[in-house]
Image (cartoon, rainbow, N blue to C red):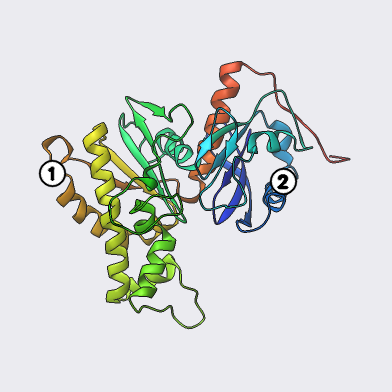
């Protein structure tokens, strides 16, 4: 069994994942992204506390962490764009010091989108594909590459951070400090914001969100459809650019925004045909992620599993509740 954490701007999730990649126990809390460093760290601890109540906890042999980025896998730190409380936060050390984890086996840190790529290549929509881009489109936008059949995460763990490449040189400013970033057009937050700016409003009792915009789009609301079309166009430009650089064969899209289904994928495929025009990228295929909300957790567990098998143990020692 492997413990995994998936930390994003909206939620902090945890799971126990077995050798086959099945999630056998899950926990989740909202991310207190605008609160203190201590409050963020305590929320992560609480998720681990919840996982430790499972009977499967005693079989845990490693820990994997998927975090919104940027991350520094060498230093074990994270600075998520959408979590202002954490800048160069020593997340690996914080998790390692949890009282329920007593181990010499260091937790493995991945960017959340790199973890998603690992999961989709292991068990999901990129399985059997040698060259793929896997993207998370949610509160933020990130990505991970599989090239020549191997996960490529770069020296600091940030390769594939596609949400912060520019698709509009005069576009809106981004929280990262750049302009015209994919995330500023395609994230769930950007979709809802643009829809509201064009006069759309959610149904009574609902909040303005990408899911609410998608619901209106399915009913034919032109402003909602336009918001998703704008998102899809930005994603298509970024994916086509990646294909031209890396000769990827498949682009896998997951995350909350992808749950809109064909509301996103139909305009995405249409725009991709307009951007991916070179002979060697015309056959590029876009697929929805197969693992949905658990991709980050499964990918983090896959990294922990690989670390455990690479070093050959020793088994992770875990603390038990009295009487357990």
Q: Nearer the viewer, residue 2 or 75?
A: 75
Please report the residue visible at 57 percent of the width from the left and 23 percent of the height from the top. Answer: 307
Say which element carries label 2: helix
Q: Nearer the viewer, residue 67 or 219?
A: 67
Q: From the viewer's perspective, tell me whether residue 157 is left or right of residue 56.
A: left
- Is residue 4 visible in this depiction of the protein? yes
Q: From the viewer's perspective, tell me whether residue 269 is left or right of residue 41.
A: left
Task: Report if the CB atoms under discs 2 and 1 are less than 8 Å apart.
Answer: no
On the image, the x and y values in percent for residue 34 come to 61, 59
Q: Nearer the viewer, residue 164 or 30?
A: 164
On the image, the x and y values in percent for residue 250 come to 28, 39
Q: Which mark is residue 136?
A: none
Q: From the viewer's perspective, tell me whether residue 260 is left or right of residue 7.
A: left
- Is residue 214 visible in this depiction of the protein? no
Characterize the local packing of mark 1: few (<14), some (14-19) or many (20 or more) Cα atoms within 10 angstroms: few
Among all residues in the image, which is located at the extreme right? Answer: 323
Residue ID for mark 2: 45
Among all residues in the image, which is located at the extreme top? Answer: 312
Quadrant in the picture for residue 152 = top left
Please report the residue visible at 27 percent of the width from the left and 63 percent of the height from the top. Answer: 229
Residue ID for mark 1: 277
On the image, the x and y values in percent for residue 313 come to 66, 18
Assign the N terminus to one quadrant of the image. top right
Quadrant in the picture for residue 134 = top left
Say which element carries label 1: loop
Asked if residue 173 is positioned above or below residue 275 in the image, the reply reads: below
Asked if residue 260 is positioned above or below residue 45 in the image, the reply reads: below
Q: From the viewer's perspective, tell me whether residue 176 is left or right of residue 10.
A: left
Between the residue at mark 2 and the residue at mark 1, the CA separation in whole angstroms equals 48 Å
On the image, the x and y values in percent for residue 37 come to 68, 49
Characterize the local packing of mark 2: few (<14), some (14-19) or many (20 or more) Cα atoms within 10 angstroms: some
Among all residues in the image, which is located at the extreme bottom? Answer: 204
């Amino acid at each position: 069994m492997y413990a995994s954490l998936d930390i994003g701007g909206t939620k902090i999730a945890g799971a126990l994942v077995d050798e086959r990649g099945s999630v056998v126990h899950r926990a989740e809390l909202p991310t207190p992204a605008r609160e203190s460093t201590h409050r963020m760290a305590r929320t992560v601890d609480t998720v681990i506390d919840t996982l430790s109540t499972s009977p499967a906890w005693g079989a845990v042999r490693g820990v994997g962490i998927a975090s919104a980025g940027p991350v520094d896998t060498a230093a074990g730190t994270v600075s998520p764009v959408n979590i202002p409380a954490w800048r160069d936060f020593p997340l690996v050390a914080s998790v390692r010091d949890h009282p329920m984890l007593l181990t010499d086996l260091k937790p493995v840190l991945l960017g959340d989108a790199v973890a998603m790529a690992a999961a989709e290549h292991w068990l999901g929509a990129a399985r059997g594909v040698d060259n793929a881009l896997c993207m998370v489109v949610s509160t933020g936008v990130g990505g991970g590459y599989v090239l020549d059949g191997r996960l490529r995460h770069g020296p600091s763990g940030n390769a594939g951070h596609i949400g912060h490449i520019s698709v509009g040189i005069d576009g809106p400013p981004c929280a990262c400090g750049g302009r015209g970033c994919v995330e500023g057009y395609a994230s769930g937050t950007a979709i809802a914001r643009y829809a509201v700016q064009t006069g759309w409003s959610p149904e009574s009792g609902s909040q303005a969100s990408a899911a609410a915009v998608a619901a209106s789009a399915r009913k034919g609301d032109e402003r909602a459809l336009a918001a998703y079309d704008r998102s899809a166009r930005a994603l298509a430009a970024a994916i086509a650019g990646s294909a031209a650089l890396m000769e990827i064969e498949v682009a896998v899209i997951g995350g909350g925004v992808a749950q809109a289904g064909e509301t996103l994928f139909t305009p995405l495929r249409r725009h991709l045909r307009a951007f991916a025009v070179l002979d060697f990228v015309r056959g590029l295929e876009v697929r929805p992620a197969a693992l949905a909300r658990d991709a980050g957790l499964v990918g983090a567990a896959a990294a922990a599993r690989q670390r455990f098998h690479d070093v050959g143990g020793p088994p992770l020692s875990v603390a038990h509740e009295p009487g357990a």
